[in-house]
Image (cartoon, grey):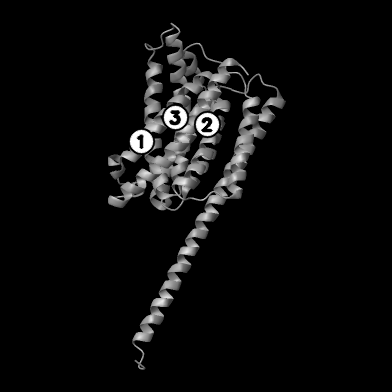
Amino acid sequence: MESDNGKGLILAVASSVFIGSSFILKKKGLKRAGAIGTRAGYGGYTYLLEPLWWAGMVTMIVGEAANFVAYIYAPAVLVTPLGALSIIISAVLAHFLLKEKLKKMGVLGCVSCIVGSVVIVIHAPKEQTPNSVEEIWNLATQPAFLIYVAITMSIVLALILHFEPLCGQTNILVYIGICSLMGALTVMSIKAIGIAIKLTMEGVSQIGYPQTWLFVMVAVTCVVTQLIYLNKALDTFNAAIVSPVYYVMFTTLTIVASAIMFKDWSGQDAASVASELCGFITVLTGTMILHGTREEEQQQASSEQVRWYDSRKSMNEEHLISLYSPEY
């Protein structure tokens, strides 16, 4: 493996460990905050006073920082799919800390994610680093990528303005869709910023270019939007469901955006591209298995709770009937 890809791989794995842990810390913090104030899913911000939520935020920032640097050294088609490891970390920790049980099919999903990630790592292309921010700007303003951005922003606005009030509390794809669409643009901006920092540290200053600061503004806007809607998703839905669905959508959109903007697959032979796609499909399959398992367990838990409530109700009714019976 190329040395730069190796650095990107190590940083991506470390990032997954931190980000996977952050989901659990933030979920526990949101639960505590929801018990004493308005829940985040209903527009509350009590979680900002919860230390455990901030611990999750710090952990996520560390993970995102490692991910940020990883994008400087390795292409998005290598770094982004390795986020599957964060799903495994999140699922395992949820099993022990949140009592969201991980069963055999969930384990199979985790193994599929690992196998797919290994295939992607083996066949990942070598990073082709642009020589200036202006060159990155030219890539960002090519017609194909501008069309992608226009479609993305149109869908995001539709989700926020129409679908969130309509079904945001019942359909996980609304919140996660907003996070994932904005996340793909975040990665493109962060990759541009990272390359600018790397070139500046090498003696070719990129600070004076207005494009550098435009990428910074886009990245900040996208990150803030992601955080708001990710908190809503975590507060409203099961953490073990949010994590894999977010991963699948975010990874798919990021790879598409990167392939359009940076042309990651140019120069690779058909066999390598096919292998990467197979690895990616394997990872997606694993995440969907994990998602399906967790959803089934949640439905079973809900039905058991309903049965328990009905049985208690029946017992209480029988008790009242016996108390008010004429025989007494």
Give the structural element (helix, strand or loop) at label 1: helix
**Which one is earlier in the sequence, the residue at label 2 or at label 3?**
3
Q: Nearer the viewer, residue 125 or 146?
A: 125
Question: Label 1 to label 2, Cα distance in Å?
Answer: 27 Å
The image position of residue 237, as x and y in percent, is 44, 49
Helix, strand or loop under label 2: helix
Q: How many marks?
A: 3
Spatial CA span between label 1 and label 3 = 12 Å
Residue 266, image quadrant: top right
User: Residue at label 1?
Assistant: 55
Q: Which residue is mark 2?
A: 254
- Say whether residue 83 is left or right of residue 2: left
Q: Are marks 1 and 3 in contact (CB under 8 Å)?
A: no
Question: At label 3, which amino acid type do we have?
Answer: Gly
- The three-letter amino acid code for the residue at tag 2 is Thr
Q: Is residue 47 visible?
A: yes
**What residue sits right under mark 3 in the picture?**
63
Q: Nearer the viewer, residue 313 or 83?
A: 313
Residue at 36% across, 93% down: 327
Percent position (x, y) of residue 176? 46, 42
